[in-house]
Image (tube, rainbow, N blue to C red):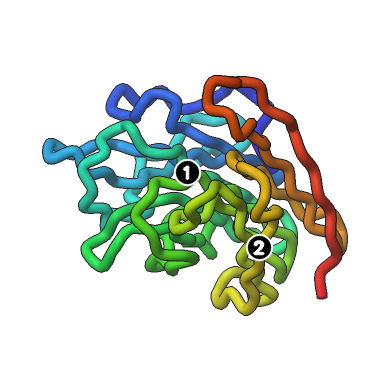
């Protein structure tokens, strides 16, 4: 679940507003972007146990070769108390092409597995990840859509494989900024729906719920 505490690591090199955190039992976890000199980025992570000092930062993903600097979407993180896994989802631009990627840690964020591509596309996209036991879901802004929309990738294998992908919002809506959660056997999705007229800044908060197949 997302961390409610303001107790976060102080990382001068972190991109402003890129840090995200989650808690699971006695553990707190954080992820953020740090920028290299060429404006590419490294996804970094740290953890704290029982509100103790944060551990030295580790690299969760070093494959990005884009030049967005800090003008990139913040990562998303979920810590699952059932499995003990830590999951992250984020937009990156490795040499093979940009897109939304997923990685997880099976050892309380000491190390992270090689990233898995959720969807490829060049448009920087926000993502949200949630997990409970075997089930993991990533909601993301589709980086290929001509009109903003939200997609979903579902895993029943703790994120080792994403067996199902689907459209999460109507193609008639301008949908951005997804937030996803798993509650028992339900997927709950929130997003912001923008007006078709670009001169109108008002948005509507939307919600949808569905069951796992």
Residue nearer the viewer, 111 or 36: 36
Tell me which residue sits at (61%, 59%) in the image: 151
Q: Secondary structure at mark 1?
A: loop
The residue that label 2 is drawn on is 167
The residue that label 1 is drawn on is 75
Location of residue 205 by image quarter: top right
Residue nearer the viewer, 113 or 212: 212
Is residue 113 visible in the rendered image? The answer is yes
Tell me which residue sits at (28%, 27%) in the image: 13
Residue nearer the viewer, 129 or 158: 129
Question: Which residue occupies the extreme front position in the image?
Answer: 197
Q: CA distance from mark 2 to mark 1?
A: 21 Å
In the image, is 75 to the left or to the right of 40?
Answer: right
Instruction: Establish if 65 lies above or below 32.
Output: below
Tell me which residue sits at (58%, 69%) in the image: 159
Image coordinates for residue 31, horizontal then vertical, percent: 46, 41
Is residue 80 visible in the rendered image? The answer is no
Tell me which residue sits at (12%, 36%) in the image: 37
Image coordinates for residue 189, horizontal then vertical, percent: 74, 49
Which part of the image, by quadrant, shows the N terminus? top right
Q: Secondary structure at mark 2?
A: strand
Image coordinates for residue 165, horizontal then vertical, percent: 62, 71
Which part of the image, by quadrant, shows the C terminus? bottom right
In the image, is 137 to the left or to the right of 36?
Answer: right
Residue nearer the viewer, 110 or 18: 18
Which mark is drawn over residue 41?
Answer: none
Instruction: Establish if 189 lies above or below 177.
Output: below
Whether pointer 2 and pointer 1 mark residues with C-beta atoms closer than 8 Å, the reply is: no
Badge 1, how many Cα within 10 Å: few under 14, some, many 20+? Answer: many
Image coordinates for residue 167, horizontal then vertical, percent: 66, 63
């Amino acid at each position: 679940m997302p961390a409610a505490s303001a107790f976060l690591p102080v990382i001068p090199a972190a991109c402003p507003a890129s840090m995200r955190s989650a808690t699971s039992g006695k553990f707190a976890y954080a992820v953020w972007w740090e920028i290299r000199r060429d404006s590419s980025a490294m996804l970094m992570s740290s953890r704290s146990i029982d509100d103790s000092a944060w551990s030295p930062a580790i690299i969760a993903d070093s494959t990005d070769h884009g030049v967005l600097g800090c003008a990139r979407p913040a990562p998303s993180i979920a810590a699952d108390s059932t499995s003990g896994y830590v999951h992250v989802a984020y937009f990156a631009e490795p040499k093979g092409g940009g897109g939304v990627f997923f990685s997880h840690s099976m050892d309380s964020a000491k190390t992270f597995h090689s990233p898995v591509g959720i969807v490829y596309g060049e448009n920087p996209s926000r993502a949200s990840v949630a997990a409970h036991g075997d089930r993991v879901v990533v909601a993301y802004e589709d980086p290929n859509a001509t009109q903003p929309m939200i997609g979903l990738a579902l895993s029943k294998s703790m994120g080792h494989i994403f067996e199902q992908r689907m459209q999460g919002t109507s193609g008639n809506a301008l949908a951005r900024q997804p937030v996803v959660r798993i509650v028992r056997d339900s997927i709950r999705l929130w997003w912001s729906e923008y007006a078709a007229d670009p001169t109108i800044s008002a948005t509507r908060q939307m919600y949808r719920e569905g069951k796992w197949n």
